[in-house]
Amino acid sequence: MFELKKDKKIYVVTNRKLIKEDNIYNVIEACAKKGTDAVILREKDLEYDDLRKLAEGIKIITEKYNILLIINGNINVAVDIEADGFHTGFNSFKDMVKNNILNFKIEASKVQKKFLYGVSVHSINEGIEAEKLQADYLIAGNVFETDCKPGLKGRGLEFIEDLSRNVNIPVIAIGGINHSNIEEILNSGAEGAAVMSYAMKITTENK
């Protein structure tokens, strides 16, 4: 899949519970070698200490390959390890902006580089509002039905096309993306694609 991205981006979203015959560090390094552009560390069950320890280990890999490390759901870990960004859902992002949590955290940190805010959206209106609230990129989906959310109908390529026309920040498509459909995703106006299931199995399936 990575060789098909051309000038677009591929984001790897982690889920260590999908890794059956390897460990998350080896999987991330395999994805980095193949050309991923960013890793979104999304391990929602981990509290601060465990997530920070995992993030610090993965940061060694992302820095080695000069790719982005974005922390999902825990702004404290993102700031404390000086990650490249923070990702969250639309409603959480709205609340954090309203309560000035994001700016306060960044201003109080030692982060000097550009710090990215990513937001997951599921409608055109959410994407437009997230951009107005100064999101730097959007993860939009799910495009196709996916093993991660069985039974949830995909929103289709039209959703990505429409969203890309209505915002001026990068749109990263997610949901059921694989070798057979990534090219049509990348031709739909998306800046790139995000993969979870595919990426977490990459070393064991040798893809």
Image (tube, helix red, strand yellow):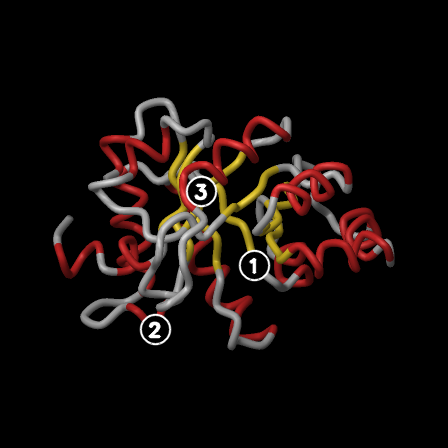
Q: Give, as a three-letter code, the residue at label 1.
A: Asn
CA gap, disc 3 to disc 2?
22 Å
**10 Å crowding of disc 3: few (<14), some (14-19), many (20+):** many
Query: Contact, CB < 8 Å: mark 1 with mark 3?
Result: no
Closer to the camera in the image, 169 or 141: 141
Viewer-closest of 114 and 193 = 193
Of labels 3 and 2, the one closer to you: 3
Give the spatial CA distance, label 1 vs label 3: 16 Å
- Comparing 25 with 45, the one in front is 45
Q: Residue at x 23, y 39 (%)?
A: 1
Ranked by sequence position, the earlier of labels 1 and 2 is 2
Residue 105 placement (x, y as % from top left): 78, 54
- What is the x, y in percent for residue 82? 62, 50
- Return the residue at label 1: 72
Q: Earlier in the sequence, mark 3 or mark 2?
A: 2
Q: Residue furthest left?
A: 206
Q: Is residue 121 above or below residue 47?
A: above
Q: Position of residue 107 (x, y in %)?
A: 82, 47
Q: Position of residue 17 (x, y in %)?
A: 34, 73
Question: In terms of secondary structure, where does tag 3 sit?
Answer: strand
The residue beneath circle 2 is: 17
Please give left or right for residue 31 compared with residue 173 in the image. left
Secondary structure beneath dot 2 equals helix
Residue holding disc 3: 173
How far is disc 1 from disc 2 in space, using C-alphas? 16 Å
Question: On the rendered structure, is 57 left or right of 125?
Answer: left
- Determine the residue positioned at 44% across, 49% down: 39
Q: How many marks?
A: 3
| Type of the residue with mark 2 | Lys
Residue extending farthest right: 99
Residue located at (31% from left, 24% from top): 6
- Residue 178, labelled with which disc? none
